[in-house]
Image (cartoon, helix red, strand yellow):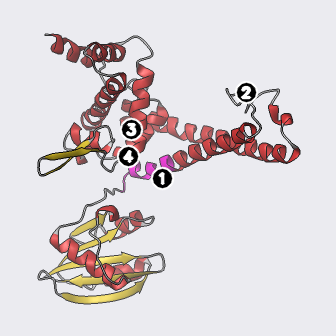
């Protein structure tokens, strides 16, 4: 017997709704959120089990707990879930999930329980730390901008002669507290750097990623944590889309309504575009590729994006083959175009 299970999961309770292969409800039950209760309910169902729940903060815990208990597990992306009209409650949400799973209408979110998947927590925490540091700096600079004082350069944060004394006493108090936040974020970043460098030394895939131009230990860890399993990208075009390095046409009835960037990882776009920007500052194959693009009439922005795509495509090849990056291939591509 086929069971299609919709699980509306919350921190305190979970609502299970089960339908059969014909879409008829066979069971509905609310349980307390906990390993014992969840496993007890799932194991009470006899037959082939398909289960789904929405991506959430504890989705990874549920994935690890349930994946070996069912024949199919789909952690669905709520952004692409067809929305119901009418009243809303946990039972109706669970029933809707079960019916959508039965119809094959769900968009899955990738989950894994490997080291690289665990690394995502560290990378996400690092990204939040960097964002907090930037926000503290902006608030600090805003205190000076409000008095028409210049805030250019990094001396405003470090060294002797900080211009805090130019501010009124209240603003000075706030400025010093913000500087404490900035310094704290910088100290914490150094601790993350220690972890990232250790990963480069101990993990082959991450180490190979550092062979890409301008891919530092931090960027290599970010890429590895985002990709995890390169086999989930059948080709470079899918990965470019995931990295938000391409735009897709909006077409209807043969008419174009512009282009749109699909849902993906913004941090990967930053990594590859920043790497391309850094690489073209020095002489080498990457700079030659960029200059060749400009010579063909490509805009500087598009040329950098094309170089970033090259790096992104190389990422998948490196992680699939286990071989380091060979920058000379950029020159080979240029020679082919010329011929």
Is most of the magenta stretch helix, strand or loop? helix
> Residue tagged by mark 4?
265
Q: Which residue is at the front of the view, 138 or 258?
A: 258
Residue 114 within the segment the image draws in magenta: yes
> Residue tagged by mark 1?
121
- Distance between mark 4 and mark 2 Cα atoms: 33 Å
Mark number for residue 269? Answer: 3
Q: Which sits earlier in the primary sequence, circle 4 or circle 1?
A: 1
Range shown magenta = 113-124
Determine whether the residue tagged by mark 2 lies in a helix, strand or loop.
loop
- Tell me what residue is drawn at x 36 percent, y 15 percent: 287
- Distance between mark 1 and mark 2 Cα atoms: 33 Å
Using the rendered view, name the quadrant where residue 273 is placed. top left
Q: Position of residue 8 (x, y in %)?
A: 36, 77
Q: In this rendering, is residue 115 above or below 81?
A: above
Label 2 neighbourhood size at 10 Å, few (<14), some (14-19), many (20+)?
A: few
Residue 113 lies left or right of residue 165; in this view the side is left
- Distance between mark 3 and mark 4 Cα atoms: 7 Å
Determine whether the residue tagged by mark 3 lies in a helix, strand or loop.
helix
Q: Are marks 3 and 4 in contact (CB under 8 Å)?
A: yes
Q: Where the N terminus falls, by quadrant?
A: bottom left
- Distance between mark 3 and mark 2 Cα atoms: 30 Å
> Residue tagged by mark 2?
155
Label 1 neighbourhood size at 10 Å, few (<14), some (14-19), many (20+)?
A: few
Q: Which residue is at the front of the view, 187 or 100?
A: 100
């Amino acid at each position: 017997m086929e069971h299609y299970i919709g699980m509306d999961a919350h921190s305190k309770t979970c609502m299970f709704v089960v339908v059969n292969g014909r879409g008829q409800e066979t069971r509905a039950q609310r349980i307390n959120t906990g390993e014992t209760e969840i496993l007890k309910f799932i194991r009470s169902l006899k037959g082939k089990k398909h289960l789904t729940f929405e991506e959430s903060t504890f989705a990874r815990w549920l994935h690890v707990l349930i994946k070996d208990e069912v024949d199919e597990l789909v952690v669905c992306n709520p952004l692409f879930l067809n929305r119901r009209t009418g009243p809303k409650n946990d039972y109706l949400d669970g029933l809707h999930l079960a019916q959508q799973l039965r119809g094959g209408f769900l968009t899955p979110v990738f989950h894994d329980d490997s080291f690289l998947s665990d690394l995502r927590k560290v990378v996400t925490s690092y990204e939040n730390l960097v964002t907090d540091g930037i926000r503290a700096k902006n608030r600090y600079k805003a205190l000076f901008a409000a008095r028409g004082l210049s805030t250019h350069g990094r001396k405003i944060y470090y060294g002797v002669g900080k211009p805090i004394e130019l501010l009124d006493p209240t603003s000075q108090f706030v400025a010093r507290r913000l500087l404490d936040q900035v310094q704290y974020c910088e100290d914490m970043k150094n601790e993350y750097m220690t972890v990232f460098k250790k990963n480069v030394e101990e993990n082959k895939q991450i180490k190979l990623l550092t062979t890409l131009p301008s891919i530092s230990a931090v960027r290599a860890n970010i890429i590895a944590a985002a990709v995890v399993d390169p086999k989930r990208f059948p080709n470079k075009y899918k990965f470019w889309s995931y990295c938000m390095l391409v735009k897709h046409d909006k077409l209807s009835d043969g008419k174009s309504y512009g282009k749109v960037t699909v849902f993906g990882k913004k941090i990967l776009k930053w990594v590859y575009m920043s790497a391309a920007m850094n690489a073209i500052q020095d002489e080498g194959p990457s700079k030659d590729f960029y200059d060749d693009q400009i010579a063909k009439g490509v805009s500087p922005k598009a040329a950098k994006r094309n170089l970033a795509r090259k790096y992104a495509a190389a990422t998948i090849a490196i992680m699939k083959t286990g071989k380091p990056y060979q920058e000379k291939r950029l020159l080979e591509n240029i020679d082919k175009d010329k011929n």
